Amino acid sequence: MVYAEARRACGWTAGLSLALAACGAWLATAQTMERVSGLIPTSASAALERHGAWCAVLLVLCPCWSWLAAVRGDALRTKERTLWLVGGADAWQASVSQVLGLCTVALVSVLLLALMIEWRAGATTLPRELGPAVAPHGVWIDHQGLTWSAHTPPPADAAMLCVPLGLGSGAGAATRVEFSVSSLGSTRRSESLIALQGDACVAWPADTSDTFDTGTTLQLRTMEPAARVWLMEGAHWQAAPEPASTASVELALRTLLLLAVLAAWAHGLAMWMRPALAAVVALLTWGAIAFAWSPAWLAGAQLPEALYTLRAGSIPITIDAWSVADALAGALVGLVLSVRGLARGAAA
């Protein structure tokens, strides 16, 4: 049944959405190929290529897949009602087979688009995001610098500490910032070029477990005497660089979870309202919750944050088992709506 529903889902709507997503991803990567010399490093440019391509894919697939699921649900409720009744299938079998069929097509589509994005963007390495770090924020940094002590141990595989900075004044279009960390009598320094906004990162010492009683000392300062930058909130840890294709894997998994939830919701709502309205309600409901609230329990709600992380030049945080469980729970809610509506239509 799942195979049959997957073949039905591979109609003109699915094919058109896949073609539009592929064209959008191709154009998005082409538009971000030009690098700003001296301001955007190669790794950041590669991250922007993937960021634009995945945004284009999401903008096409989300509404198209919601519409496709709603149309399939409406067809099951009206035109194809006798097929599952005469065949002996109950409402659960009919709804589950259709939703799984849609998810199967979505899985194949997302995999093909991910391969195209990787082939177009090329191979490079990006650091992986590990999570937030404790650091001061909301202060100006000038040539005198700001010094503080770190008392919270980093994650086990942390290789870099990054703090976000905003360009202040006195340095033209960009300014150089020195970030240093002192531990066990040795000091590591790095320089970063901040243009409007960017991260200053420094390599973290390999073993600082014995220094947290007294504190590992960190310092930020501008290289130009008249320049200053604004230290913003959002310090974070990064791991050693990994293949940039890992970022597409993380985004592909989140995209698939999102499409599964949207397909189930739109399919279930189509049993109670018109297909167009069901698709719009499912999409807007998820969008309002994800972008306004971003709860951890909503499958795919981490997509905006993951895209922002990739745009900043890092691989998003690894997806966890709870996100998969949330997607299954969200899809189950849509399936319950579908079964209830289908059973009510059959009884009528």
Image (cartoon, rainbow, N blue to C red):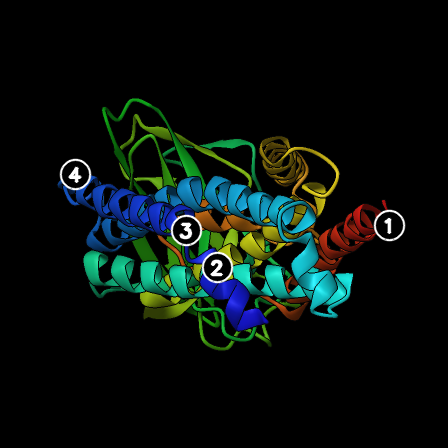
Horizontal and vertical percent position of residue 65? 50, 47
Question: What residue is pinned by disc 3?
Answer: 14
Residue 36: mark in rendering: 4
Which x, y percent locates residue 35? 16, 42
> Dot 2 surroundings within 10 Å: few (below 14), some, or many (20 or more)?
some
Question: N-terminal of the two: label 1 or label 4?
Answer: 4
Q: Nearer the viewer, mark 1 or mark 4?
A: 1
The residue sitting at 64% across, 40% down in the picture is: 286
Of circles 1 and 2, the one toward us is 1
Q: Which residue is mark 1?
A: 347
Q: Identify the disc placed on residue 8.
A: 2
- Answer few, some or many: residues within 10 Å of disc 3's Cα (few below 14, many 20 plus, some between 14 and 19): many
Tag 2 secondary structure: helix
Quadrant of the rendering where the N terminus is positioned: bottom right
* Percent position of residue 55, x then y: 39, 43
Secondary structure of the residue carrying numbered label 4: loop
Q: State the SS at label 3.
A: helix
